[in-house]
Image (spheres, coloured by chain):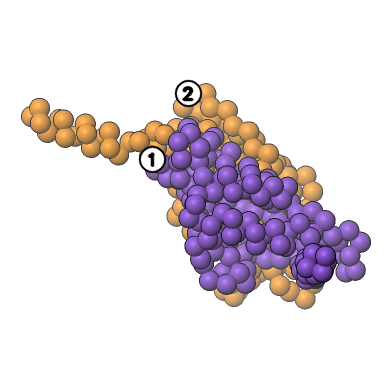
Chain colours: A orange, B purple
Amino acid sequence: MLKSTAIALAAVAFAAPALAEMSDEQQVLNAINNVGYFAEQGDWDQVAAQFHPEGAVLDYTSYANASAGTSADLPTLLPAEIVAAWQTVLPGYDRTHHLMGTESVSVDGDTATTTANIYATHILENEGEDTWIFIGDYQHELEKTDDGWKITFMRANLRAQFANENLPALATERVAAGNN
Amino acid sequence: MSVEITNSVSRFFASVDRCDWPAVQALMTEQFHVDYSSYGGGPASEVSPEGLTAAWAGFLPYFDSVHHQIGNLIVEQNGDTAEVRCHGMASHFIAEHPGGDLQFVVGTYDLELKRDGADWKLSSMRFNFKYASGNQTLAAEAQRRAAEANSETSNA
């Protein structure tokens, strides 16, 4: 009995260091940075895994053409619903690059808030200009779960968009037509 | 304990932008794996800090300025090693160059770091090219300037 407990404790001690060495602040930043990183690669399971399994509020009310989070009552969406909405448009681009920076993070017990700037470039070759750029800022709230930090709230504040503003519509059409 | 890791990554790119090669070398392990194959850089190879920075020193200073905007650092630490994935947007600038004075080279980086005493040093760097925009002739102009500077040196 004593021996098996000792082995179990040793196993826990052995498994824990990788996560324990990482500051909560970096684990929080990893979660919000992973969203864009994996969305760009089309790894939707990994995108969904960054959100709280019980759901998150997405607030894209600053950008009426967003595929999710535009409704004023800000419903809680399940991770699967969030990635399903994003999959109606993002895979339609040739490439996207969600460059974030200017990040701040504050951890308070099992909750965290972050702010970040976002400079998102979307590229889709077409008869017109092939680039659309979304510039703004993000605010996230996260909760610490047994499975790490998960996003419970994500707001995108559009500051400016430029180049070809018709690109999201073209990308959506391309996904709908199955040409991506 | 992660800020030491992200500091090393930030200082590495900032030192490249300043063309401060001793500072860049000090942030690298003696054996360094570099892979720019996604951007026409030839196959991945093992290089020394001096070898890699000598190659960069023969090219990057011949732009008027170079700016690596790095963001979205995702850090996975495992004891004395760490992997960092990040986004990057490199701006290359040559004033008043015909066709435009700016070129952007955009992609992500996969980096590996090793703990060396109190320091974290980069041991591997792979660039995953996504797209380039702006004036694509700027790199050729930087190479032309480098060749010119070289021939002046050898004539001297």
Q: Residue at x 45, y 45 (%)?
A: B114
Horizontal and vertical percent for residue B41? 61, 69
Q: Amino acid at mark 2?
A: Gly
Q: Which chain is home to disc 2?
A: A
Horizontal and vertical percent for residue B55? 65, 62
Badge 1, how many Cα within 10 Å: few under 14, some, many 20+? few
Give the number of the mark in front: 1 or 2: 1
- Seen in the picture, residue B129 relative to B4 is either above or below; the reply is below
Horizontal and vertical percent for residue A61? 69, 44
Horizontal and vertical percent for residue A54? 44, 40
Extreme residue toward the front, this view: B156
Question: Is residue B17 left or right of A154 when viewed as pictured?
Answer: right
Question: Is residue B79 left or right of A87 when viewed as pictured?
Answer: left
Quarter of the figure that contains the N terminus of chain A: top left
| Residue A178 visible in rendering | yes
Quarter of the figure that contains the C terminus of chain A: bottom right
Q: Amino acid at mark 1?
A: Gly
Badge 2, how many Cα within 10 Å: few under 14, some, many 20+? few
| Residue A145 visible in rendering | no
Q: Residue at x 66, y 50 (%)?
A: B21
Disc 1: which residue: B79
Quarter holding residue B147: bottom right
Question: Is residue B74 left or right of B150 when viewed as pictured?
Answer: left
Q: Nearer the viewer, residue A61 or A101?
A: A101
Give the secondary structure at mark 1. loop
Q: Which chain is home to disc 1?
A: B
Q: Residue at x 51, y 67 (%)?
A: B44
Q: Nearer the viewer, residue A118 or A78?
A: A118
Extreme residue toward the top, this view: A109
Disc 2: which residue: A109
Q: Residue at x 58, y 28 (%)?
A: A106
Question: Is residue B147 left or right of B32 when viewed as pictured?
Answer: right
